[in-house]
Image (cartoon, rainbow, N blue to C red):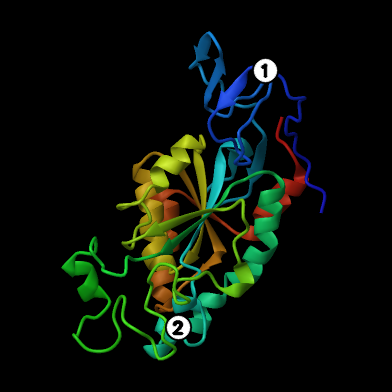
Amino acid sequence: MEIKTQTPNSAIKTPTVTGISRNFHWRVTPDTVDFHWRVTPDTVDMAMPAPTPVTVKIDCQPQSVIIDLQRTAIVVIDMQNDFCAAGGWVDNLGGDYQADRAPIAPLQKLLPALREVDVPVIWVNWGNRPDLANMPPSQIHLYKPTGSGIGLGEALPNGARVLQKDSWAAAVVDELSPLPQDIRVDKYRISGFWDTPLDSILKNLGIKTVLFAGVNTDQCVLHSLTDANFLGYGCIMLEDCCATSSPDFCTEATVWNVKKCFGFVTDSCKVISALIDGQVR
C-alpha cells in the first residue's frame, strides 16, 4: 500500500533536542523539534515550534474531518485475553467473548498503516496491582456484584489472575501483539484517563486528535473517549474497530452520543483510504 504523506527526513545537525520524538528516540534535527526544547551549551530554546503538518481528510459522521497525522494517535483499549480469548474472564463468566474479537481483523490492517506514517499506537489496558491497593470498593463491587464468582485479581481456572498486571489474563491477545515502539498504559477504571499517565503522554507527544478502538464500545471505549473530549482532544471512534458483548442498543446509543456530543465516527477502511489518498494541501 502506498501512503502519500510527507514526513521530514533531514540530515542530523545541531542543536540537539531534549525530549522524546514521534518515533520515540532522542532526536537531533534542524527543522523539527517535536514539541521539546532545543539545547546548545549556552542556550535553551523553549519555543518548541510544531512540526510541519501532514494533513489527511477522513470521511466521518456527522462531518468529514481533516486531521494532522503529526498530532494524531490511536488508543486501543482492553483488547485483552480476559475479554477477548477463550479461557479468559468473560468466557468463564459465561459471557460472549467472541463478540469482543470483532476488532482484531480490522486492527490487523489499520495499525501497520498508521505506524507507517508514524502515528503512535497506544495500548490502554487493565493492569491492576496484585494488592489492588488503588482500587476502591466501588470498582471491586462492579466486577463481583453478588459477592460470588471470580472478581478482580482472583484466579481463573487456568491460574491467571483477572486483569492483573503481567498476567496472561491482562495480556493483549496474540493476534494483536504490541510492537516495541508502541506505548503501553495500565488503567484501573473504566476510563483510561483516571489515575493513569495517558493524558500526560498524549500532551508530551503533542497530540490533538485521538482515534479510539477496542472493547467494550459502551463502557471503557466510550468513557475514555468522553474524558478525552472533556480534556480538549478531538475524538474519532473507529466503529468497526470497537465491539461489545452488551445488547445492540448499547452500541446504537454510544455511536449516536459520540456523533451528537463527543466527536466523530468512522471506520478503519475510511482511515486507510484517507492515508492512501494523501495529504490535503
Task: Name the disc covering residue 14, or none.
Answer: 1
Q: Position of residue 275 (x, y in %)?
A: 72, 47
Which corner quadrant of the image does residue 200 belong to? top left
Which one is nearer the viewer's eye here, 127 or 243?
Answer: 127
How many other residues sit within 10 Å of disc 2, few (<14), some (14-19) or many (≥20)? many
Q: Position of residue 213 (x, y in %)?
A: 52, 60
The answer to whether residue 233 of the structure is visible from this angle is: no
Number of on-image labels = 2
Q: Name the residue under label 2.
A: 88
- For marks 2 and 1, give the one nearer the viewer: 1
Q: Please identify the quadrant where the C terminus is shown.
A: top right
Which one is nearer the viewer's eye here, 123 or 218?
Answer: 123
Residue displayed at 55% across by 46% down = 73
Which corner quadrant of the image does residue 266 belong to? bottom right
Residue 99 drawn above or below residue 240 = below
Q: Which amino acid does label 1 sit on?
A: Thr
How many other residues sit within 10 Å of disc 1, few (<14), some (14-19) or many (≥20)? few
Q: Which comes before the other along the chain, label 2 or label 1?
A: 1
Q: Cα distance, mark 2 to mark 1?
A: 51 Å
Residue 209 drawn above or below residue 138 = above
Q: Please identify the quadrant where the N terminus is shown.
A: bottom right
The local secondary structure at tag 1 comes to: loop
Q: Position of residue 107 (x, y in %)?
A: 62, 64
Residue displayed at 55% across by 35% down = 20
Q: What residue type is labelled 2?
A: Gly
Question: For this view, does 1 lie left or right of residue 209?
Answer: right
Q: Residue most toward the top?
A: 42
Q: Residue most toward the front?
A: 41
The local secondary structure at tag 2 comes to: loop
Which one is nearer the viewer's eye here, 6 or 59?
Answer: 6
Residue displayed at 61% across by 22% down = 16
